[in-house]
Image (spheres, grey):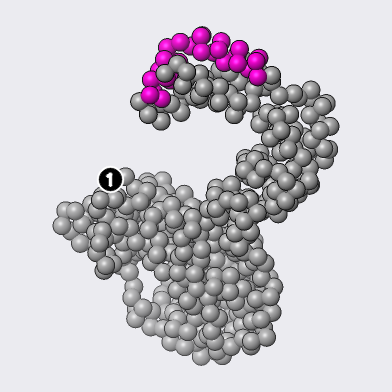
């Protein structure tokens, strides 16, 4: 039996997660009024009768918000539909009208998907437009409303345009949830729809989590975890919640469908209100707004203006490099926006894996735009040709970015020459002689197939050799020599 992927000790159970991601749109103004859509201003300065819900005020729909929502929809392979706004009624002080204008049974985007770097595909149920709420701050006590001395309300956020992206319950591990949100964030940034800052709340994640025995088709009862404002919290909360549910079911108890809050400090979820069903919100069509029906020409313009998205960029780079699109170097190069540089260097004849290693580990994104693909290819050529060690190449690369000069010039100036094989072998032999018991251990670990121990001891010897060679030794050559000597000794 396999355990829940990525969580130890949960044998026989399968995790099922659906994610709801709220992202604030990068518009200049709010969804239904002309107030600035701006984070961090003094409280209650970006407000007007419309976003304060004063009687007699009427909403006017923001054109740019509709356009950004369509952009999100098409980037997520959704169909863009004529849509209708609806009132979602609930009583809460951060909602001045006591209802939120959202979309219910006729959302603007539906039935799409998102392809993840790991090769999996997550269905997108819908991505609808709605307005954000204001923000409560509870002073005194623990920061929660219970035990607070008083509460403050800031309506600057009330009426800020949001798109809520609802996934199918296709996510099967905490890591996959993290990958999904990270990929979504990259896309939102790439298409300019949102600044997607989880730390400022412009991207917020709720996770619907349930578990079921392996092989069971029906879903278990789910709980919705709120307050997930970092990728780390997302992963930890799902892990915690899966374990909590399995423990309850294991003792014959039932899961209650409810909203739960993630407490980052305590590392646990806590029960909130019991989960509302749709009927509790008494949805009805918003009478102050007409249906939204973007014309085909507008939609065509939106589609034509979409940039090439990360999944397609990974495919292109992978094709050029002769690697899988799931290769970590390929994923990271696109993630860091350095895929054009990598492709250019590979096209100029450089070894793809070395290029991607530099792009993944040795290049800061800032400054990398000054680096030419031809210069990177030249550096990698010197490295694969044996003129530079990996460590030296890394140093030269940093200099290239800082100064804009070519690799040959920098290497000559620094006096870099790859260490002579004979000299390196002498250093390796000395390290083995000086650490005889570790060496015996290393040979034994290899014979026993103890990879963990072998890795640790390889690190030990590599460190000693690097130290003795003052960093001049080439890591790959060291590894080859160690392996050769170990196999000779066994
Ligand atoms: Zn306003």
Q: Is residue 260 above or below residue 77?
A: above
Q: Position of residue 165 (x, y in %)?
A: 49, 69
What residue do we see at 74% from left, 42% from top? 376
Tell whether 421 sits left or right of 153: right
What residue do we see at 76% from left, 24% from top? 416
Any part of residue 138 in sight: no
- Where residue 91 sits, quadrant-wise, is bottom left
Any part of residue 343 in sight: yes
Tell whether 398 sits left or right of 294: right
Q: Main secondary structure of the magenta part?
A: helix
Q: Is residue 2 above or below residue 489?
A: below
Residue wearing tag 1: 9
Q: Is residue 388 above or below residue 200?
A: above
Q: Position of residue 56 (x, y in %)?
A: 57, 88
Q: Which residues are magenta?
A: 421-447
Could you say whether the residue bearing mark 1 is in a helix, strand or loop?
loop
What residue do we see at 37% from left, 62% from top? 17
Towards the viewer: 211 or 442 = 442
- Where residue 480 sits, quadrant-wise, is top right
Q: Position of residue 137 (x, y in %)?
A: 49, 59
Q: Is residue 191 above or below residue 58?
A: above
């Amino acid at each position: 039996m396999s355990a829940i992927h990525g969580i130890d000790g949960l044998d026989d159970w399968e995790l099922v997660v659906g994610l709801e991601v709220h992202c604030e749109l990068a518009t200049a103004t709010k969804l239904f009024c002309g107030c600035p859509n701006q984070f961090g201003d003094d409280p209650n300065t970006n407000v007007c009768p419309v976003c304060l819900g004063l009687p007699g005020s009427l909403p006017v729909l923001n054109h740019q918000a509709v356009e950004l929502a369509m952009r999100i929809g098409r980037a997520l392979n959704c169909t863009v539909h004529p849509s209708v706004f609806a009132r979602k009624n609930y009583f809460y002080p951060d909602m001045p009208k006591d209802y939120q204008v959202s979309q219910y049974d006729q959302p603007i985007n539906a039935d799409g998907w998102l392809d993840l770097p790991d090769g999996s595909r997550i269905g997108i149920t819908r991505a609808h437009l709605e307005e954000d709420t204001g923000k409560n701050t509870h002073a005194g006590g623990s920061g929660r409303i219970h035990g607070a001395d008083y509460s403050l309300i800031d309506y600057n956020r009330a009426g800020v345009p949001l798109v809520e992206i609802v996934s199918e319950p296709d996510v099967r591990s905490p890591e996959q949830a993290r990958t999904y949100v990270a990929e979504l964030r990259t896309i939102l940034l790439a298409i300019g729809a949102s600044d997607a800052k989880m730390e400022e709340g412009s991207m917020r994640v709720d996770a619907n989590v349930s578990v079921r025995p392996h092989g069971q088709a029906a879903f278990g009862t789910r709980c919705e975890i709120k307050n997930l404002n970092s990728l780390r919290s997302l992963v930890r909360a799902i892990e915690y919640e899966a374990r909590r549910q399995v423990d309850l079911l294991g003792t014959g108890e039932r899961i209650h469908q409810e909203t739960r809050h993630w407490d980052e400090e305590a590392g646990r979820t806590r029960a909130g209100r019991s989960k509302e069903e749709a009927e509790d919100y008494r949805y009805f069509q918003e009478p102050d707004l007409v249906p939204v029906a973007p014309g085909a020409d507008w939609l065509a313009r939106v589609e034509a203006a979409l940039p090439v998205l990360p999944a397609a960029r990974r495919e292109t780079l992978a094709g050029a490099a002769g690697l899988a699109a799931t290769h970590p170097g390929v994923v990271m190069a696109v993630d860091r926006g350095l895929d054009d540089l990598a492709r250019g260097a590979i096209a100029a004849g450089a070894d793809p894996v070395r290029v991607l290693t530099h792009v993944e580990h040795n290049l800061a994104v800032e400054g990398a735009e000054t680096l030419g693909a031809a210069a990177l290819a030249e550096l990698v050529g010197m490295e694969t040709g044996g003129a530079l060690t990996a460590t030296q190449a890394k140093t030269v690369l940093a200099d290239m970015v800082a100064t804009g000069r070519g690799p040959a010039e920098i290497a000559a100036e620094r006096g870099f020459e790859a260490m002579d094989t004979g000299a390196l072998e002498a250093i390796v032999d000395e390290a083995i002689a000086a650490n005889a018991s570790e060496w015996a251990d290393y040979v034994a670990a290899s014979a026993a197939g103890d990879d963990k121990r072998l890795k640790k001891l390889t690190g030990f010897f590599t460190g000693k050799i690097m130290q003795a060679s003052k960093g001049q030794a080439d890591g790959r050559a060291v590894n080859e020599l160690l392996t050769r000597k170990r196999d000779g000794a066994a």
